[in-house]
Image (spheres, rainbow, N blue to C red):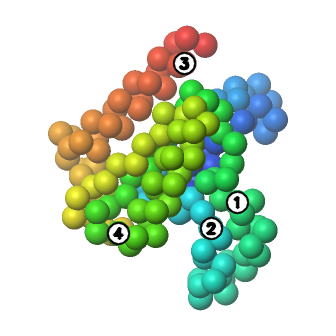
């Protein structure tokens, strides 16, 4: 749910949701193991609990959202995760790049859904370095505002 929620936050124009908030309140994100297209969930046993209609799934899938140009988003997926995670990360990066978002898919070799966060415990890991780059980008935006 975290990768999905991160993509939703980056894609949201917050001006109408929070008085005085800028539209780009969340200008960049690092979505880890995200599901960005919820439609495939409708045909799984998980949908017994979710109760998503296909229309609801489309509406709640950031893959199909319009997102403002100039935002940054990394769709991060473990190399050992399922093909569906890889497809969704790739599709989101491609779709949002076409809208002017600096979006990319990043793979963490050998990681799966349960081990993908482990590199964040290492201050010298590539994941930690990328997060610091995104924080610095956000700080530059704040300074320019």
Q: Where residue 60 is drawn, which disc sits there?
A: 1
- Residue drawn at x 67%, y 53% is 64
- Which type of secondary structure does the marked residue at label 4 adopt? loop
The answer to whether residue 3 is visible is: no
In this picture, is 73 found above or below 109? above
Q: CA distance from mark 1 to mark 2?
A: 7 Å
Mark 3, Cα crowd under 10 Å, few <14 / some 14-19 / many 20+, is few
Quarter-of-image position of residue 60: bottom right
| First along the sequence among labels 4 and 3 | 4
Q: Are marks 1 and 2 in contact (CB under 8 Å)?
A: yes
Q: CA distance from mark 1 to mark 3?
A: 29 Å
Q: Are marks 4 and 1 in contact (CB under 8 Å)?
A: no
Give the label, 2 or 3, closer to the camera: 2
- Which type of secondary structure does the marked residue at label 1 adopt? loop
- Which type of secondary structure does the marked residue at label 2 adopt? loop
Mark 3 sits on what residue?
142
Mark 2 sits on what residue?
38
| First along the sequence among labels 4 and 1 | 1
């Amino acid at each position: 749910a975290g990768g999905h929620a991160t993509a939703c936050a980056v894609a949201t124009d917050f001006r109408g949701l929070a008085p005085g908030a800028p539209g780009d309140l969340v200008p960049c994100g690092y979505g880890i193991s995200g599901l960005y297209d919820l439609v495939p969930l409708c045909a799984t046993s998980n949908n017994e609990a979710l109760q998503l209609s296909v229309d609801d799934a489309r509406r709640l899938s950031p893959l199909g959202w319009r997102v403002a140009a100039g935002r940054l988003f990394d769709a991060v997926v473990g190399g050992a995760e399922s093909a569906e995670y890889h497809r969704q990360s790739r599709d989101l990066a491609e779709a949002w790049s076409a809208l002017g978002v600096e979006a990319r898919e990043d793979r963490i070799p050998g990681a799966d859904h349960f081990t993908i966060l482990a590199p964040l415990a290492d201050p010298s890991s590539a994941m930690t370095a990328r997060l610091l780059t995104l924080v610095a980008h956000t700080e530059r935006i704040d300074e320019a505002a």
